[in-house]
Amino acid sequence: MKSGKAVGPDDIPVEVWKCLGEAAVEFLTSLFNRVLESERMPEEWRRSVLVPIFKNKGDVQSCSNYRGIKLMSHTMKLWERVVEARLRKVVEICEQQYGFMPRKSTTDAIFALRILMEKYRDGQRELHCVFVDLEKAYDRVPREELWYCMRKSGVAEKYVRVVQDMYERSRTVVRCAVGQTEEFKVEVGLHQGSALSHFLFAIVMDQLSEEVRQECPWTMMFADDIVICSESREQVEENLERWRFALERRGMKVGRSKTEYMCVNEREGSGTVRLQGEEVKKVQEFKYLGSTVQNNGECGKEVKK
């Protein structure tokens, strides 16, 4: 863990363990072994502080434009790192997932999409892309769905129980500019700000998309950022509906207002894409993983930044 991070309710920063050196290693090894053996972590680790962070887009008065970040015990996060390392040894995530995977980054996903767009631009053919938004993705993951996906991915039952214990009786308070709320239970979703949540979400998405995803670069995911591409508008519309059905039947939800459609090298009368009869917003450019991609396949705006 990096130093300088906001502490959780126990007020013990990771710097304490770093300063203690070998003594900390011995103590934490003994502690984590006891937690693993008993499948029960200390009660203090179940508490967190939720801080709403503005996404820097949309109405500042709308709660939907804020992301809740949980300030959790740093010692708990170290335990999560240990569990994550064990899970990564046994779980194989599909190649379409670029988010938080070894030797993969946003640059790889952006490059793959740009190469595909340039290929179709140079060949003077249309390429249809839908950038799918998952509404409150991490917050919506049903816990039972998470356990099911872990088991289906080959995770040993002991580690399923260990992760279940991390979420059992979890409690939080919301901290904002005017004060702090009363403590309440959190019974759905993944912990935002958790060291393990990204990989758990990748496991869920890997299983949920198994029947609908296509090969790279026709389907690419970076955590909850999904782009699906096709040579025809009809096909990308059909694929979008299949994704919607696969996700929503398992408790996830496609955000209609933020899902957008873009046609590269568009000809006249290419039309629009619809999702359950509702027209998907058509755009000339889209900010994909922080990089602006344009429907003419060029990167002029990105170069000028």
Image: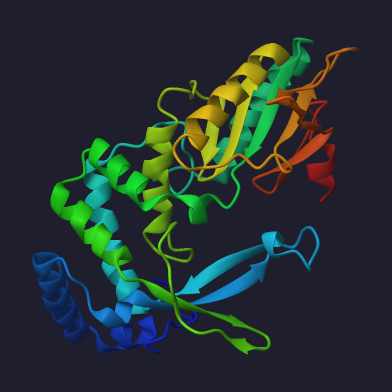
**Percent x, y for residue 130?**
68, 29
Q: Quadrant of residue 29?
A: bottom left
Q: Name the residue nearer the viewer: 124 or 6.
A: 6
Q: Quadrant of residue 178?
A: bottom right
Vertical arrangement, residue 240 with respect to residue 183, above or below:
above
**Percent x, y for residue 235?**
64, 13
Q: Name the residue nearer the viewer: 45 or 20.
A: 45
**Percent x, y for residue 251?**
47, 42
Task: Left or right? Give the position of 215 relative to 288.
Answer: left
Q: Quadrant of residue 243?
A: top right
Task: Left or right? Give the position of 57 relative to 95.
Answer: right
Q: Residue furthest right?
A: 268
**Percent x, y for residue 196?**
36, 59
Q: Quadrant of the N terminus?
A: bottom left
Name the colour scheme. Answer: rainbow
Task: Left or right? Give the position of 299 relative to 207.
Answer: right
Vertical arrangement, residue 166 with respect to residue 278, above or below:
below
Res. 218 in view: no
x 52%, y 36%: residue: 248
- The total number of labels drawn is 0
x 21%, y 73%: residue: 41
Res. 99 in view: yes
Vertical arrangement, residue 1 with respect to residue 247, above or below:
below
Task: Left or right? Give the position of 288 relative to 253.
Answer: right
x 24%, y 64%: residue: 165
Q: Name the residue nearer the viewer: 128 or 216.
A: 128
